[in-house]
Image: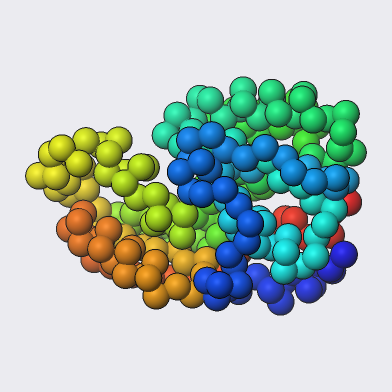
Amino acid sequence: MASAAGAGRRCGTAPAAEAAVSAPDDRSLTETGLPPDGMGRVLVIGCGALAHEILALKRLNGWDHLDLTCLPAIWHNHPNRIAPGLRTLVERHRAAYPTILVAYADCGTGGGLARTCAELGVEMMEGPHCYAFFEGQAAFAARASGEIDAFYLTDFLTRQFDAFVWRPLGLDRHPELAPLYFGNYRSLVYLAQTEDAALDRQAAACAARLGLAYERRPTGYGDLAAFLAGRG
């Protein structure tokens, strides 16, 4: 198993081809999540929006002791479902895994996810949302006051922009409403986990659709790598 230091060396922005690992398509990760597959000692329960990154880190570091299961990524739009869904998965798999980790931040649960994890005795990531741990908690906090008018995307959310933003807000039917929803935003910041020119262009197009200035900020896997390193 790779050391935490080794994980740290690998947590920079990855080439797109290097980060591509065996995973279901983004639509499945959005709508249904991911069942566990493997015989590891540690189960990671994560958001479907993090599946590609967790599997990439697993492959890059040789973390064969980690298995992954994910709740549907679209539950970010329905955060009241996350804590009950987590409880169901922990109770279902606890007997099979000595260690269970939760690859979620608070993600709009208002502290409910942290309380559920504490009650179940499982460890979760710190922070308000995945944007913070991809950039790094300290770096994100330092920028927070100056980016109150920023709208964030990750690799996954760029690919699934229509499913998470455009259609839920009805902009597929009424694109003229975009200024109403996003008039108080100044910029769209793409937190890039991989070096992918096509995704960069796609994120820039999302910014244009919303009428926002565009910034690409390479983050790699951020705090996610350190959270998973050296477990089990």
The residue sitting at 62% across, 23% down in the picture is 84
Q: Is residue 71 above or below residue 50?
A: above
Q: Position of residue 222 (x, y in %)?
A: 60, 64
Whether 132 is drawn above or below 171: the answer is: below
Question: Front-most of 36 and 98?
Answer: 36
Instruction: State whether residue 36 is above or below residue 231.
Output: above
**Location of residue 90 by image quarter:** top right
Horizontally, residue 87 falls left or right of residue 81, namely right
Q: Residue at x 80, y 46 (%)?
A: 38
Q: Position of residue 210 (x, y in %)?
A: 21, 54
- Tell me which residue sits at (65%, 34%) in the image: 114
Q: Quadrant of the N terminus?
A: bottom right
Q: Position of residue 97 (x, y in %)?
A: 86, 37
Visible residue check, residue 136: no
Q: How is the image coloured?
A: rainbow
Residue at the outermost left position: 176
Task: Report the residue at 72% width, 55% height from top.
Answer: 227
Position of 223 with respect to 175 (left or right) is right
